[in-house]
Image (cartoon, rainbow, N blue to C red):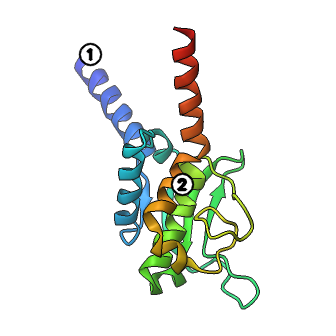
Amino acid sequence: MKKSILLLTFLLTSILTFSQDEVQIDGRIQPILNDFFEYCKKYDIDYNEKLFQLESIQIVDTLPLDKYNTVLGKVLRDKNGNINKIVINWATLFDKEILRVVAFHEFAHHFLDYKHTCHDCNEIMAEVNTSYFDIARDWDNQVEHMFTTSPVYLNKQHEANTSLASN
């Protein structure tokens, strides 16, 4: 009897843990997400906990794609205001550079705690980008700027400096 209870407890715990740790990631986005995580490692930014706060990262056909109202990517929030999904418009699939810029932009909202940096200023985190190709041509500088000016990175630097000053 004792073995049965232990086995049942173990199975229930395993099932609950597994279901909480599953994030549905569209395979077309996975390589770009992996690249983003490599940059996170480079800048010593932990992403694991935030990854498992998400339900999914998906390419969708539900975002507006009109002449005067196009949304290429978006973070969705749960009823408590927490980001729980990242969605990217299917139209980004037509160009790998646009897809990469849009994906990094949306990832940065969640993993780097970014808001938009400007309306249209040729930065990855701009609200509007009139030339994704300018950003793509300057990719290394753009990514470095995005990471080193991100709220998560700046907070980490501030904490490190405060810790050094108190020693």
* Residue 54 in sight from this viewpoint: no
Where residue 154 sits: x, y (%)?
58, 38
| Dot label at residue 22 | none
Dot 1 alpha-carbon crowd within 10 angstroms: few under 14, some 14 to 19, many 20 or more: few
| SS assignment at label 1 | helix
Residue drawn where x is 46% and y is 70% of the image: 100
Are the two marked residues, 2 and 1, in contact with CB atoms closer than 8 angstroms?
Answer: no
Q: What residue occupies the far left of the structure in this picture?
A: 3
Residue drawn where x is 65% and y is 80% of the image: 130
Q: Quadrant of the N terminus?
A: top left
Residue beneath label 1, please? 2
Task: State the image quarter where residue 86 is shown.
Answer: bottom right
Residue beneath label 2, please? 145
| SS assignment at label 2 | helix
Q: Earlier in the sequence, mark 2 or mark 1?
A: 1
Residue drawn where x is 53% and y is 46% of the image: 148
Dot 2 alpha-carbon crowd within 10 angstroms: few under 14, some 14 to 19, many 20 or more: some
Instruction: Work out how far the residue at label 2 is from the one at label 1, CA to CA, in angstroms.
Output: 58 Å
Drawn side of residue 93 relative to residue 68, left or right: left
Say what amino acid the circle numbered 1 marks. Lys
Residue drawn where x is 72% and y is 91% of the image: 67
Q: Nearer the viewer, mark 2 or mark 1?
A: 2
Where residue 117 sits: x, y (%)?
69, 58
Nearer-the-camera pick, 121 or 84: 121
Task: State the image quarter where residue 69 is shown.
Answer: bottom right
Say what amino acid the circle numbered 2 marks. His
- Figure check: 110 above or below 10: below
- Figure check: 149 above or below 98: above
Where residue 35 sits: x, y (%)?
36, 59
